[in-house]
Image: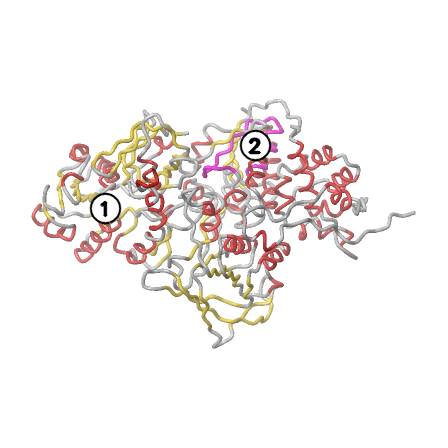
Amino acid sequence: MYEIVERRMIVPNLHEFTVEAPEVAQSAQPGNFVIIRPDEYGERMPLSVADWDSEAGTVTSIFMQVGGSTSKLARLKPGDTIPTCAGPLGKETEIGRFGTVLCVGGCYGIGSIYPVARALKEAGNTVYTLLEARSSYLIYWEDKLEEVSDRVIKLTRDGTAGYKGHITRLGEILTLEKIKPNLIIVNGCTFLMMKTSKVTEPMGIKTIVNMNPIMIDGTGMCGVCRLTVAGKMKFACVDGPDFDGHEIDWEEFLKRRQTYNPEEVHPLRKSGCASHF
Amino acid sequence: MAKQIDYKRRHMPKQEPFERIKNFDEVALGYTEKLAVEEASRCLGCKKPFCIEGCPVAIDIPGFIKCIVEGDFATGVKKIKETNALPAVCGRVCPQEDQCEIKCVLGKKGEPVSIGRLERFLADWEAASGSTETPEIAPPTGKRIAIVGSGPAGITVANDLALLGHDVTVFEALHDAGGVLTYGIPEFRLPKAIVKREVEYVRSLGVKLYVDYIVGKTKTIDGILKEFDAVFVGAGAGLPWFMEIPGENLNGVYSANEYLTRCNLMKGFRFPEYDTPIKRPSNVAVFGGGNVAMDSARTALRLGADEVHIVYRRSRQELPARLEEVENAEEEGVIFDFLTLPVRLIGNKQGWLTELECLKMELGEPDDSGRRRPVPIEGSEFRMKADAVVCAIGNSPNPLIPMTTPGLEVGRRGNIVADEETGRTSRNGIWAGGDVVTGAATVISAMGAGRNAAKDIHKYLLNKKS
């Protein structure tokens, strides 16, 4: 059993979640994920690692509350236990001396891009971090990211913080900010990763994305996380989750992610007011 | 007067097909005491028992059968457990017809003794009696052994080394122990309660078990070796193989590993009580002809499919599955499309599978495996309606340990290279066995590899200076 150290909603619908898992904390690297089960009936859910403390033996993730399983996680309180926190899984994000790197984070990926930015900074890169959100109230961990970035740039769809608009404005933003990245790394929802890759491809900037398909075991056995990369079948849990965003078959990936959408929200449909009386 | 030879085996009671396709309960119900004694009495008690030669773990088969005839079931169980830690499992899933039973002298003129069913009878009798006798354990040696994976290979090594007095720790990557016995083989063929019982038995010998511990990731083999005197790697199956035809990433296309794991380990058949969903499609095509294909097809039927096809490129004769499982599938209404090769999967705009295109085959000259090679018949393309495909054509060994253990020799197909006799790998202190070495094979062959490795590890530990 793994004890919950912290679980709080940091911005609407996004939860910060810290579990005591000393062995996982010992081995965690940027880009890794863990497999969580909220209870004995629960699904095995992959969550990107957003931070860890190897001395305290804890691992932190950010997750969005969308369906039945994430709602179960969202109900957990400090002191509660969960039956599974296994990992760290997946290959770590390649950290090298690339020169200038732009880290892009959106949604839960604002959390998981943090250790990536930190490691890149420690490796001697110039690190710019771009936070993308629908609105200013959905941005979190700004202070943490400021600490490990040379500059933090914000982009909100309603313009309540930083630039107004979508990631499609990336080229223009880079010019205005006078940034010439040698590498871009994106963590976040599939759309953000796909759109960023589509924008950067004609610009010729290598773009690494941290893929988030459906998984079960997460250990290279079941094959549900397969995707097409450069025309070849790859498995996100052991070949990734980092891939070159310009080589991914995004259309196929998006469709595969939607396989269980109806089942995902099934438990929520049954939780209407009438069911409580 | 010489004993009259009885050439006919006793049938084992089963759930009726129309009944069983509506539930996930075990199909075969096992011998009653009366049937078991009758069946056991057929054994000739050969002076030179060939059956033992056929058993990868060399169980004293005539010995335990004699105990059944005499009604001394407790001693019978003890005899089996001398060499086999998992009798309730092996009695159910071993391909006895190709191993011990094929060697039975009675088989020359009639039907061989049902060795597997008798093994199962004894194991179930012991479970029902409620008291499991723990064998004598040798005094502690102070040696620590780590075992990666709690499947058939790992459990066997754990059992053997614990009995020899070693301090054994098993690391399991998933949240339940048992490996393929838990995630792969369905409830209706091997109830999970039985797997749990056998794992508990091995733990009762003092074996420590950690689940959710992924050796290679949570800690590397080299990290483990700092705390242990030896490591056995029985990490099992890895990534599934696909046909490499267009359309395999359409929604509705599953690997057998995924399909069965959803159902067995995650209990998808009980969704929404359990959270992991599994689809309930109407027209299912399963590719492949082994036991895993049969398991997938029969699972699909139980999940309510209207039509389930096994699409196999050779003929019935070449099916690698156990005959018993093929017959079960046929009885239950699985449709077999022999000499049929899927060439393309077709989907709709939303990315869901709707149809498959196949070619008809004919048998040509024998190939390397000695089986007649199936050759496509030109112009024989046809289409078949399908809203789900389960690809059950095998898998490569698990990649996590080869990927993270420097200096460990790996074969062309990603398998860990290990000596067949001893399980030794290219690195000192590391042994391996089971699917991670051979690729997908049987439960009992993994147990055989485990047995051999345990012997060699024991020898190594005795010679090793602490």
Query: B39 or B52, which is in the foreground?
Result: B39
List x then y, in percent, for residue B265: 48, 43
The numbered mark 1 sits on a residue in which chain? Answer: A
Note whether A155 is above or below B341 in the view shown. above
Q: Which residue is mark 1?
A: A186
* Left or right of residue B376: residue A262: left
Q: Which mark is residue B200?
A: 2
List x then y, in percent, for residue B228: 49, 29
Label 2 packing within 10 angstroms: few (<14), some (14-19), many (20+): some
- Which quadrant, please, contains the N terminus of chain A? top left
Please determine if labels 2 and 1 lie on a single subunit.
Answer: no
Circle 1 SS class:
strand
Q: Is residue A199 on the magenta stretch?
A: no
Q: Is residue B157 on the magenta stretch?
A: yes
Residue B416 in view of the camera: no
Label 2, label 1: how far apart the Cα atoms are: 46 Å
List x then y, in percent, for residue B153: 56, 40
Kind of residue sitting beneath label 2: Glu
Residue B333: image quadrant is bottom right
Query: B318 or B304, which is in the foreground?
Result: B304
**Coloring basis for residues:** secondary structure
Residue furthest to the front in view is A277
Magenta residues, start to end = B154-177
Query: B166 or A182, which is in the foreground?
Result: B166
The numbered mark 2 sits on a residue in which chain? Answer: B
Residue furthest to the right in view is B1
